[in-house]
Amino acid sequence: MVGCKCLMPIMAIPIALVWFWAAKLMKEPSMPAYNESWWGPGEPRYIDDKIRPFEISVSDEILKDLKYRLEHTLPLQPALKGTKHTYGINTNLLQKVLHFWKNEYNWTEREAYLNQFPQFLVNIQGLDIHFIHVKPKVPKSIKVLPLLILHGWVGSVREMYEIIPKLTTPKQGKNFVFEVIVPSLPGFAFSDGAAKKGMGSFNSSVVMKNLMKRLGFERFYVQGTDWGASIVQAMSVMYPDKVIAMHSNMCIVNMFKGYVTNLIYAFYPTFLLDEEELKSAHMYTQSIDLSVWFYRIEETGYFHLQATKPDSLGVALRDSPIGLAAYLLEKFITLTKASYRGIDDGRLEETYGMTALIDNIMLYWITGSITTSMRIYAEHWSSEFPGNFDVDGISIQVPAGCARFEHDIVFYPKAVLKVKYPNLIHASFYEAGHFPALEVPDVLVDDIFEFFDKVMKL
Ligand SMILES: *[C@@H]1O[C@H](CO)[C@@H](O)[C@H](O)[C@H]1NC(C)=O
Ligand SMILES: *[C@@H]1O[C@H](CO)[C@@H](O)[C@H](O)[C@H]1NC(C)=O
Ligand SMILES: *[C@@H]1O[C@H](CO)[C@@H](O)[C@H](O)[C@H]1NC(C)=O
């Protein structure tokens, strides 16, 4: 070794730089300033914000047009041998879906099913927002908790139809029950899409907060999945005085300190995992597993496309019901369990039932909302709206509960969750995929009750 003494001061420079940057990255951003914007077309103007009862009622014209398009579907390209669902949805399966949709799916019945809960429209910041609102009928001794439940992309309010009755019916041994408010996110199904740029999870949070305010809830509880999870997280950061507690079945940690913690445990699982988590340690080491990264790259092309060119893609999907079905159903295969890509029927019927899946596609089709729904990716991930990232980077102080599903897109041990949720009072682990409300409704409902039981005892 030569000149080791003179190397010392030289080494100090990069160390200081790394230290400086690490400290900067570890620091939480401050809450972005904002004004409550007008999202409707044109200039802000007065709009009656009366709450209007709403029922789904599709015109004969739309139904006839759909029937025509389904019947005139151009021949589907035969899938290559052995590809199953890895090149996108397999057209052998899609052919069966088409047959079912044309011949067995009965809209008259499904419309009645979809109208089983009271639904409303109300204008918030220039947008008509659609929501389901179910109040439980219970004796005074049972406490009623107002719970805002938010769906995500590729989903819709339809995801929640199995859990709504279970959450609004008293559960044995629990002295509380939920009054649920289940809106369509801005741009989804019967909720208007924004007429200008910027409706990421930050600005969606403002709209959802104002919806709750309009309904008379100054303080309330939130639950979310997928984009809905992103929005309930943002609401918990932005409105800690309104959100009493949050539950999510897709807790997301987009914080530098979270990444660092993630890396530490991935190399040294025993360092941060508790006893229970060690049993499924393989789940937590994914961040350093290259095959997992390759898998993610393979399956997230849609994300990049929707975050950059949602409108081009939207034209095609808006014009073809079977094209829309192909695009949406593929996600229900892959995001439920990676290995379902290798199974002929993708386990769709077995896991969800084709009827429920077509219901969900119908909500996009009859409202023509696929383009506006996909825009949330572009609005959220645009560098033009850094406030979305800032809010992601701020920790949540309200009591939080995370239901973790083994085959979901993200998955963290408690040590990482606690970076984002210092007040984490509940973290559970289940074997299901990205759509638990549809796949395992009882598991999700039990978990929500369990979490709120803990909240009630705080
Ligand atoms: C909010 O509106 C006020 C008054 O119109 C303006 O001065 C301020 O810059 C706006 N803030 C943001 C973050 O847009
Ligand atoms: C659809 O369901 C309705 C209500 O149950 C029924 O009257 C109608 O005949 C059904 N249509 C078809 C094509 O089966
Ligand atoms: C929210 O919307 C407003 C109005 O379009 C925009 O100025 C602001 O940057 C948006 N904020 C974020 C974080 O997207």
Image (cartoon, helix red, strand yellow):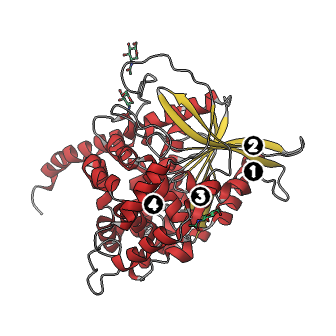
What residue type is disc 3 on?
Thr
The residue at which mark 1 appears reads as 168
Which mark sits nearer the N-terminus, 3 or 2?
3
The residue at which mark 3 appears reads as 108
Q: Is residue 336 visible?
A: no
Which residue is nearer to you in this view: 79 or 272? 79
The residue at which mark 4 appears reads as 410
- Residue 113 position, x and y percent, is 64, 57
What residue type is disc 4 on?
Val
Q: Secondary structure at mark 2?
A: loop
Which mark sits nearer the N-terminus, 1 or 4?
1
Q: Residue furthest bottom?
A: 81
Q: Secondary structure at mark 1?
A: loop
Which residue is nearer to you in this view: 438 or 261? 438
Which quadrant of the picture is home to ligand 2?
Answer: bottom right
* Crowd rating for badge 4 (residues with CA inside 10 Å; few <14, some 14–19, many 20+): some
What residue type is disc 1 on?
Thr
Q: Secondary structure at mark 3?
A: helix
What residue type is disc 2 on?
Lys
Mark 3 vs mark 2: in front: 3
Q: Residue furthest left?
A: 2
